[in-house]
Image (cartoon, rainbow, N blue to C red):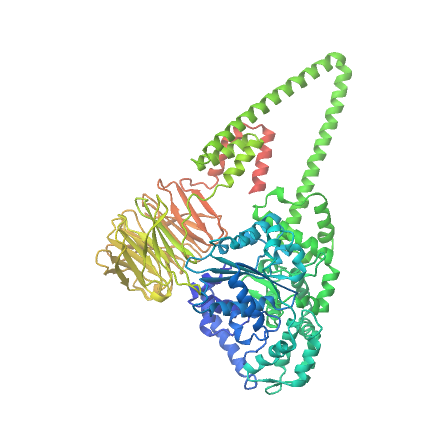
Amino acid sequence: MRAEAGSPTYRVMAERANQGASTLSQAAAGERMPTLPAVLGYVRACGGDEAEWEGRWREAAAEAAAQPRTEDEEAAPPYRGLARFEPGDADLFFGRSELADRLLDLTRSLRFTAVFGPSGSGKSSLLRAGLIPRLRNLGPAGPRPVAVRVLTPGEHPLGTHAERLRPADGDGDTWLIVDQFEELYTLCADAAERNEFIDQLLSATGPGTRLRVVIAVRADFLGRCAEHPGLTAALQDTTLLAGPMGQDELREAIVKPAQTAGTIVERILTQRILDEVEDEPGALPLMSHALLETWRRRKGRALTLEAYQAAGGLNGAIARTAEDVHSQLPQSQADLVRRIMLRLITPGEGTPDTRRPAPRAELDFGDPDGTAKVLERLARARLLTLEQDTVDLAHEALIAAWPRLQAWINEARDRLRLHRQLTEAARTWDALDRDPGALYRGTRLTAAEETFLHTDVESDLTALEREFLVFSTTARRREEEAADRTTRRLRQFTVTLSVLLVLALTAGLIAWQQYRVSEQQRHQALTAQRMAVSRQLAAESDGLIGTNPDLASLLAVQAYRTSPTKEAIASLYAAAALPLQHRLTVNTDGVTSVAFSPDGHTLATGESDTTAWTLDNKVRLWDTATDKLRSTLNGPIDGVASVAFSPDGHTLAATGGADDVGAVWLWDTATGKLRTTINGHTDTVVSVAFSPDGHTLASSGDDGSVLLWDVATGKLRTTLNRHSDILTWYTKSVAFSPDGRLLASGGDDTKVRLWDVATGKLSATLNGHTDAVESVAFSPDGHTLASGGADHTVRLWNLATGGLLTTLNGPTDTVNTVAFSPDGRALAGGGADERVRLWDVTLSDPLAAMRKINQAVHRSLTQSERSAYLADQLETA
């Protein structure tokens, strides 16, 4: 259901559902039982049928209630199994107190600290459940951190985490915890990006910084860390080694979690585990999983040796759990287990195999229902973790502890290395808008074809990977066919030339040679002229890049199209690398809305931040000439949904979130003081608009109503929609006509409504969209209305007749916003497919625009060139 809704993030869903993001994600991942409000909120956020899902929830609840259970069957287990300990598990984290205290002292005295240890030594848990709670509990001697951030590098550490490498605003330090640091070497293939990421981390050691860095690294990657000179120097005196636990620490980790849950561990079982763990490297996750499975098989309130043996013991519990899941699945889903698990592995090269987090989209094997069921079963068994859109192994110990998985890896080790390379190449090709230059060629294509396309493992590929290989083979075939045609033409030309040479003898030879010389001279002269023009344009681009970047960019493009000289290529890259002209930095988790004042001198930003450390939901006013913060408008707002200036620029309106449902706030922009708070909606206000004369404010909200307010008094002037059926739908957008007589509104019921502002009566209802209407806009002359919707279309309406003028297709996802150009000739639309499209709305014939563009080109082409051009246009279309 979430995928069909466009895969919105859990933060966006939380705002729609009025539920916490963690509540929704953990419920979907099977980590907590969802309440009925959580289920209905999730369904509402995805546009599903709430009545249908309420029935499902009640049926499941009744079925669960009918099952016999012990009095403590619902008790939360005191052991984490293969999952790492999180900050909220600090009361269950035993055995590492001394090591956690040493780590705290080290991080307070140094700005860069490294924790090394073998896989399974508990490094991640030490950071999360040991260090972070201690940082949060620092007293005045601390001081307490202004922020604590935890991240794992992933495939693109800089592209993903650039903003998080900067210290947060405040008087204290920001602690940056980089877990699984070895991903820089197992997942990140770009050495330059890896080194720059390390350089930015090491900058924390400089004087005056407000950043402290703690990294956790697997011990077998120490040699890779030594490849970076700066990192080598930083690790000399800043390293903490996470070695094996002593007997007393292990006994604590075994017994005390059970005590917190009101259970006991048999002494004979405790001694058995101590004996088995003592000489077993990296055994902590094995022990934790064995204890979890023993706890599930407990008798009364005792964890017994018999239950431990039934679970499989230290070395067999993980394998038994995994085999139980695998054996209980039908054959088709058991095969999906193999494909999913191999996707989550990076085969080692001189090092042990490591886990590889993968996006859910990569687990597309043509059976979405089956994949979802398998992921749910594996996550419920705590073999996998599901975090928003990412799937990962619960722990690397699973790789060595499950013989079947190890056999799968060994059988496909060489193929896995090729597969990881293919996955990265396909992603790069797709990110470059499927540039033919990024396709496989030569030996890489041959190896990929032999490994995947002509074997029984083709089904292991995703749709994107198969497309990538098919496009690569098609491109190679076309290149070979073109080469064959060229060869045949050369042969025919040679035969003809030979006959002419025999007939014309010396005179023909001399004439032909003269012709060749003249043609070469002409071609060289034309080429030299084009290169000279290209270099001149590139020089002009370089001269303007600092003062007029837009013109410099256009000149760079024209220089390259004229002739791809070195100078043209250099200017093109320089233009592409131009930085943002201005960046307004705010201490917030997200900017939700922006608006320029009518005179263009002021920019208003609406912000929303609900992080654990701050509550920063403000409206800020910026001076666009100096980029300076002019003022901060504080009001009773829990998240800003929308901001808008009045036509004279003297008043700013803003709408808020869950804590101030149904309110609109009006500020005096000159003084920054709150002028009035307008209340009347019964749910969140999502859109506001001023009338052209600035005397009236329209507001719409999730309660389905559209209200008109007197700006001067803040009093309700008119309630436009008086029909109960309208009130059951969210109203998402409102807009005044240029003359202020009409107001357009659109919402979840797929209709566009036109209201007479003077009388408050409904003038017309425009039907055509098949899904929610997200945005409406009037043309400057007031004769046309544009509407964008969740049905992936933009529609144009004739306001004189109320009829549909045309439907503009092209978007592949929800159209969130539409806007006319000032002259009314162009319409812009943008939305969830991450594209902005421009339409020429003056053309009634959809094909006229293409003909208009192509006419000038066709005049200069020969018949054969026109045919080739049209063929290329058709292939592109």
Q: Residue furthest right?
A: 502
In the rendered image, residue 814, in percent from the top left (x then y), is placed at 46, 54
Which of 628 and 455 lies nearest the eye of the viewer? Answer: 628
Image quarter for residue 18?
bottom left
Residue under the point 34% across and 56% down: 619
Q: How many marks?
A: 0
Residue 359: horizontal and vertical position, in percent? 58, 59
- The answer to whether one can see residue 543 in this image is yes
Of the pair 137 and 515, the residue shown nearer to us? 137
Residue 733 can be seen, yes or no: no
From the top left corner, tell me how far across and down residue 849 is, in percent.
46, 38
Rendered position, 775 above or below 489: below
Which residue is the extreme one toward the left? 713
The residue at 56%/35% (across/down) is: 569
Compared across the picture, whether 346 is left or right of 594 comes to: right
Q: Please state the horizontal and vertical placement of residue 464, each as a whole percent of the image.
A: 61, 52
- In the picture shown, does residue 68 fall above or below 683? below
Quadrant housing the C terminus: top right
- Which residue of the protein is positioned furthest toward the top in this rendering? 507
Vertical order, 840 against 343 (above or below): above
**Front in this rendered view, residue 523 or 481:** 523
